[in-house]
Amino acid sequence: MSRLEAKKPSLCKSEPLTSEKVRATLCVLKGILTSSYGPSGRLKQVHNGLGGCVCTTSQSSALLSNLPVTHPILKILTTSTKNHVSCFSDCGLFTAILCCNLIENVQRTGLTPTTVIKLNQHLLRLCTNYLKSESCGCRIPVDFSSPQTLLCLVRSIVTSKPACMLTREETDHISALVLKAFLLTIPENTKDRLILGKSIIVPLKGHRVLDSTVFPGILIEVSEVQLMKILPIKKSNAFKVALFCASLSGDLSDTGEGTMVVSSGVSLENAVLEQLLNLGRQLVSDHVDLVMCQKVLHPSLKQFLSMHQVIAIDRVGVALMEPLSKVTGTQPIGSLGSISPSSYGSVKDLCPAKFGFKHFLHLIPNEATICSLLLCNRNDTAWDELKLTCQTALHVLQLTIKEPCVLLGGGCTETHLAAYIRHKTCNEPESILRDDGCTQTELQLLTEAFCRALESVAGSLEHDGGEVLTDMKYGHCWSSQAESPSVVNWPDWLSRCGCGLCNSQEELHWSFLKATQHPIAPQTCLPHEATGSSNNLTLDCFTAKLSGLQVAVETANLILDLSYVIEDKN
Amino acid sequence: TLCTMAALGSAKAALQVTEVLETILSRCLGPEGRQVLCTKPTGEVLISRSGGCLLEALHLEHPIARMVVACVSSHLRRTGDGAKTFIILLCHLLRGLHTVIDKEQDSLISKNIQTHRRHWKNCCQWKFISQALLTFQTQILDYIMDHYLSKHFLCRSSLELLLEAYFCGRVGRNNHYFISQLMCNYFFKCMACESGFEEVFDLVDDYFVELNVGVTGLPVSDSRIIAGLVLHRDFSVYCPADGDIRIVIVTETIQPLFSASASEFILNSEAQFQTSQFWIMEKTKAIVKHLQSQNVKLLLSSVKQPDLVTYYAGLNGISVVECLSPEEVSLIQRVMGLSPFILPQASSQYEICNTASVKFCKPLTLRSKRYVHLGLISTCSFVPHCIVLCGPVQGLVEQHEGALHGAFKMLRQLFKDLDLSYMIQTSDQNHTSSPLTYKDSRESNPLPEIVNGLIQRPYQGTVVKNKGNLAKTQTYLKVYSNLVVPSVELETCIPCSTPKVTPTDTYQTNETLRCLAPTKTRTIDDNEPFIESNSANSTAENTGIEISSENLQVTKIAGKGNMLPVREKSLEMCTSQSYCCSTLPAGCVLPVGGNFEILLHYYLLNYTRKCQQSEESVVSMIIANALLGIPQVLYKSKKGKYSFPQIYIRTLHALQTSQPIVSSQKGLESVAGKYQLLTSVLQCLTKILTIDLVINIRRQPREMYDQDSDEEV
């Protein structure tokens, strides 16, 4: 039913960024994001006054999806971050904080949007070109022959989510599990294209984190009663599997657009059931051991199958269909009539398993790239956070396979990049100023704003009142303990830089990150095997961070370019 | 309330409304324009610089405003460009009209006339003006375009420059170069041969939605072009295949159903039910087997197929894609020349099977969403390619989509001929009221003597041949007589000396297309200077190149007598000799930056000086001045040499002394688009002026039933 109603006129506001209210809300959002950033970030408890569960988190995806944002400008910022996270899982907070910093810093310069956008674009290109180039000083190639770098990468991700509430031992355990789960998804022999499998995360809440494990194959949750019916499973070398995608509940399939007239005395139910039992007979005569159905199995058919020692599991759900078909090598059957023998698959072994109070049927494949990660954590919120973390880590590992390099973490990439940009614009401004009508002063102002924005992201990692410094040789980020004396011998107070690559015992000079930075040409600090520094590095995903940087600058440009906001009040 | 509305008058109200709109839209105009954020009631956020979008998003309430918006959107539907310019021009026109009317009122109408009567008197005045506008639009505008402006047009357009200028006004400043490059590449990749470029424009415009994929969360710079067609859905069944992959399209379910629509299936026994089901299964199996025997590897279906069909397809190594949209089906049909597979009714006859080959058929993953990627083999001049548009937020992706679609609309329009027609009085008796008097032309008679001999010859020829057209020919010469640069004269004199219809179509397309290729930009640059050279000093050199290329043409003409010029408009004299038809050839462009507006302004001013009828001259004057509003906005932020007054004076000076016009901008824009915009604005203005009263009623709007037709029945 349509209702004719006059539309209300929209509300049009000019120069939205100059409004005090917008600035204040942006500032609040930035405060929330920066305080959650990094391993020592503070947790946020989001709870809905109208009900629902309380979410304790410091991750951008959970935070932003729970945070209702009303102002359109903030909406742009948060959606762009959320979109980035849904593409790359990682570096969401980095993107959002950098974007906020850029908007704030650029506004302070008072340059016109045209100039700002042009120059921002140039600086971004400098950054991306540098990060992609061979000479990049904050990028490390991944050596797939040893798990060390990948393990560091996973551990950095796990430690950066404090809401998982993990101890050091648990962190190591989870990191190793995630890496193992990922390695199980890599096929052993590939021809031309590498097609990764899937790790299925199986929840087990209320248990110790150290109980978490990873299995090859699939765990299907079954009720205890069901399991009792199945047991004992007869021993065999291989189990023949049939997987149905069509419903086996006995409902009549699509009969067409016309009408169907059934004479009295004719029972369609019986006819359909007869058909189902025929199907059951065929399955039995084909020596099928396990029948799984995406939808519902008719009780009579179930009964019939169990009478013939065929294990029947129904309501598997659409999400498990693809992994199941992959693990067993079956083709989902959509017919109630004759079944082609080629549709059947097999599993190597089938065994019942009990974890905590949950019963599972474990399908052990001959050879497949599907594995199950049984994830435990003490309570619901911590488990949710841990699940997100593991998903992020698995995704990051996939991205790293595609682009086999990692960036230095702990703020070192940001400070190093800022030093590089300063150096570049100070020494070769012509390359940027050549084609645009911008002056050198404008370039310097904007470079400062841009580099400060990057450096403040690195600075946001420190939450305990310590000083953040940068060294004058590599441009890495260092943070000192709180309440260090004003004049100190820095090498004694600092041990390692943010990423853990540089040692303070080297001949280095430091300056406060907040102080005026002089342009230096940052050098590359290589990992030394001898010092063992490569074993405990903080690393970031290259693809995610690069894209996050680009998205942050593009979003900031977009927001700075807005001259009006038209709000539809309907 | 009725009285207050009446007193306000529609023109006044329109001015108030458009002034508000102008302040908003002028900030988004041109290369310096900024973005606007629009929120929808659903919570979505849209980023836009397109005038059409913004006007729609504002949900204007005032009836006049709504009429203006309707005019703008109907203009946009046709041309895809110019909404912002529309409003700015309309605003300036209304402002100009008001100042003129106010002046007259002060002098003519005494104070003691009642306000009510004054209003009706105003309305009469508006009516006269709107009639004058109509005359202007139908006669004067085309005349000026054809006689004066056309000599400045460039018919060789570089696609790159055109698109860059277009996107400057449509997308964010940091992206316009990237997007225009993307579109350029896309166009050249899609074009199988040069002659088929019009088909490419048509096809892309019609199926734009199907030919692009939006991906959010990635930076804009990740956008790219991929060969083949991407369907916005995943495979229902995927069987990897290579070699000769044949596809079929079906529009109904392959599995026969119990009963077709409007029929009855009577079931008498359980056995009957089981046999029918068995028959259905066997039949489905047979059809799928038959498809397999035809080497079909992919089944495209516009409907959802039953599980049985997908199962059998999978068993036979046939991939299935279901639920294609009608547009996707028709695109595939058009590109491949493939018609849907008709399911055989009889049991065993399926010899005739419409299949076609594809190069590949594979899944494509973009941002963890799966798509179907088909390597269609085209049978037309469109080679299918898709644009993957990335952006951090959906709003930005949509903006880029909209801009790209608009650009294809603009190009489609640009490469169509535009007909111009106007009245021209050639007989001697009417000379006083003709746009240019006979007297003028006689005065100009001796002037061609100073022009070099090359041009004189064809000119002499026409005079001898068409004595009846003497006045007209001379009129032409009057206009161009004091030109200094010979090349320009060649251009303009040739058409009038050949009173024959030129079969321009084939020539034009070849000509313009050759210039479309990006590698050819150099030659275009060489040819451009005769309109935009850097300084007066360098004119000689630049035109030197121009002359050398033009001379070739001229000698040909001299030798063969009535050899047809390659890139000129055709001029046709109708039997009455007073009605003149002419064509603005496809692909005419001018440099951006208000060039069209300033040129038209200049020639209109010249025209008003010679014009005797007061109404016409007043209207032309108002239009001429209003046109300047556009460049004023464009150069608002520029200072010094590039400020508007400086540019205006320079251009006018160049026109008066017949020097080439110096343009600071490289980009190009379509003349036809500008012309259509001006006519649309004038039509809208006429509409506004003819309304004398806005009656405000408050009642639930009724549904629009076609009552008349009911009565007729």
Image (cartoon, coloured by chain):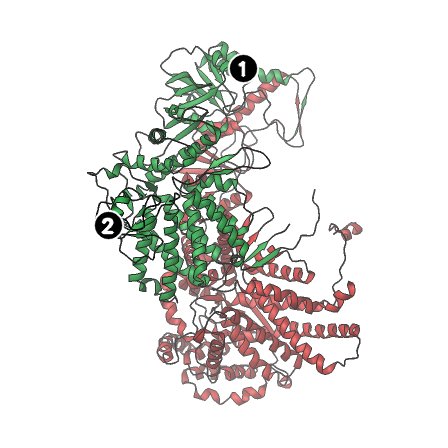
Chain colours: A green, B red
Around disc 2, counting alpha carbons within 10 Å, would you say few (fewer than 14), some (14 to 19), or many (20 or more)? Answer: some
Q: Nearer the viewer, mark 2 or mark 1?
A: 2
Q: Position of residue B608 (x, y in %)?
A: 60, 81
User: Relative to residue B703, is residue B647 drawn left or right?
Assistant: left
Q: Is residue B335 visible?
A: no
Which picture quadrant has residue A39? top left
Q: Whole-percent x and y of residue A329? A: 40, 24
- Marks 2 and 1, the one that precedes in the sequence: 1
- Residue nearest the observer in this picture, A332 or A219: A219
The label number, if any, that marks residue A463 in the structure image? none
Q: Where B32 falls versus A52 (above or below)?
A: below
Label 2 and label 1: CA atoms lie apart by: 77 Å
Residue ID for mark 2: A508
Measured as percent of width and height from the top left, residue B633 is found at 52, 69
**In the picture, residue B612 is in which quadrant?**
bottom right
Instruction: Name the chain letter of the residue that bears numbered label 1.
Output: A
Residue at (42, 68) in percent of width and height? B666
Q: Chain of mark 2?
A: A
Is there one chain holding both mark 2 and mark 1?
A: yes
From the image, tell me which residue sits under label 1. A301
Q: What is the count of numbered marks?
A: 2
Residue placed most toward the observer, B345 or A75:
A75
- Residue A278, image x and y in percent? 53, 15
Viewer-nearest residue: A509 or A172: A509
Label 1 sits on what residue type? Leu
The answer to whether A137 is drawn above or below residue A145 in the figure is: below
Name which residue type carries label 2.
Answer: Leu
Dot 1 surroundings within 10 Å: few (below 14), some, or many (20 or more)? many
Quadrant of the drawing holding the N terminus of chain B:
bottom right
